[in-house]
Amino acid sequence: MDNMDMRVMVGKEIKAGDRTIWPVMRISVLKTQEDRVQAIQITPLAMLIIEPAGQYAVSFAGEPMTIEAILELAAPLKDVLEKARRSSQDQDNSYC
Amino acid sequence: MQFSYLAVFFLIIIILLAFLLLAPFHLSLNIGKKGPLIEGSIRLTWLGLTLMNAENPPQSAGDLLASIWKEASGRKDGTIEARKSDEEENGREERSEIDNQKTGAVRPPSIQSLINAAPALARILRNLLKSIHFKNISCRLCFGLDDPAQTAIISGYLWFLASALGLFSARIFIEPWFEGERLEGELVAEMEARLLWAVFAVVQALRVREIRLLLRETLGWA
């Protein structure tokens, strides 16, 4: 009987001008009894978009997605978001 | 009487040549990387004689690259010095193409020549691969890139490559690592090759006009 290993991962960030996109994907690995990989499926789930004006999440399922929901899906994004918020605060302080 | 001596001489030469072409070379390869340490050994034997035996004790990847780099730069410096002294002897500067011809150094051929020779090159490669027989091969590779999606894609390519080369899939173990960058594994291979097919491939290659042209361009004779 084969077994399936599923995990939600954060991909490499994509930079487009001032915008940074963090893709969130589900990776499903089908393994044999001997732990040999049979197949891998990558399913894009959502993305976190960080802009100078703010941050928002987009779900590929077509439903509205909150920042809290994407953080629940992919916990490593908490650090990314924290860092982005801190840098935007620094920028605001430097303008003042 | 004289004729029979000549015939025996040629017969001995043919037997020796056949022996040389048919006696297989054995190559044992053992390379491994665990954590930051890389170790390996290569052994080449022919008719029980060890022609090459190199062992690399466990050392870090950085040290290994540094030693390879040092060796390569040393060789390069030697070549440059030799070339400089040659130019001084001649007492004049030569154009790079003429220099190329003199030193026998290779240069990249034109893209068009490469495209023209591509089908013939594929045939040669197939003939050369025929001469290699894998007696035993086992490979365990665990790798990860900075992007899990790329890791999965490269993993698929590696499986395709292993399958296309007809390697024993039971002993090939490729494990993708999605948690970050990583490269670990070991390769143990034992193969034997006969010179017959390699010589056959070279002779066949030299009969093709495109290959001759490519060779001439590479050696700077065109």
Image (cartoon, coloured by chain):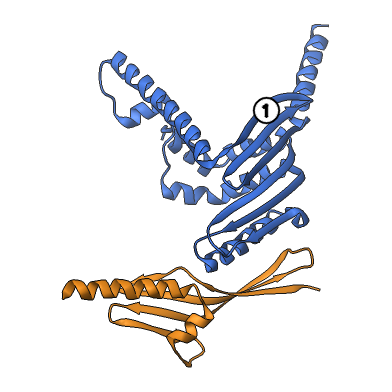
Chain colours: A orange, B blue
Judging depth in this view, the residue of B171 and B115 nearest the camera is B171
Which residue lies at the image location 73% right of the left edge and 28% below the top edge?
A: B45
Instruction: Choose top left, top right, bottom left or bottom right for residue B70.
Output: top left
Q: Quadrant of the N terminus of chain B?
A: top right
Left or right, B89 with reference to B35: left
Q: Which of B146/B113 is in front?
A: B146
Q: Quadrant of the C terminus of chain B?
A: top left
Residue A82 screen position, x and y as percent:
38, 74
B48 w.r.t. B215: above or below: above
* Chain letter belonging to callout 1: B
Residue nearest the viewer, comparing A31 with A38: A31
Residue at x 50%, y 65% (from the top left corner): B147
Residue drawn 76% across the image and 32% down it: B24
Q: Describe the element under mark 1 as helix, strand or loop.
A: strand
Percent coordinates x, y for residue A7 in the rendering: 61, 74
Density class for disc 1 (Cα within 10 Å; few <14, some 14-19, many ≥20) is few
Q: What percent of the width, then of the height, locates residue A30?
A: 70, 72
According to the picture, the residue beneath numbered tag 1 turns out to be B53
The single residue placed furthest to the left in the displayed view is A96
Q: Is residue B45 above or below residue A78?
A: above
Farthest-out residue, bottom: A63
Query: Is residue B150 something that shows in the picture?
Result: yes
For badge 1, the amino acid type reads: Asn
Residue B34 percent across, percent down from the top left? 63, 47
In the rendered image of this protein, does residue B164 appear above or below residue A42? Answer: above
Q: Could you say which is closer to the camera, residue B68 or residue A96?
A: A96
- B205 versus B48 height, above or below: below
Report the side of B44 relative to A87 (left or right): right
Q: How many marks?
A: 1
- Report whether residue A17 is seen: no
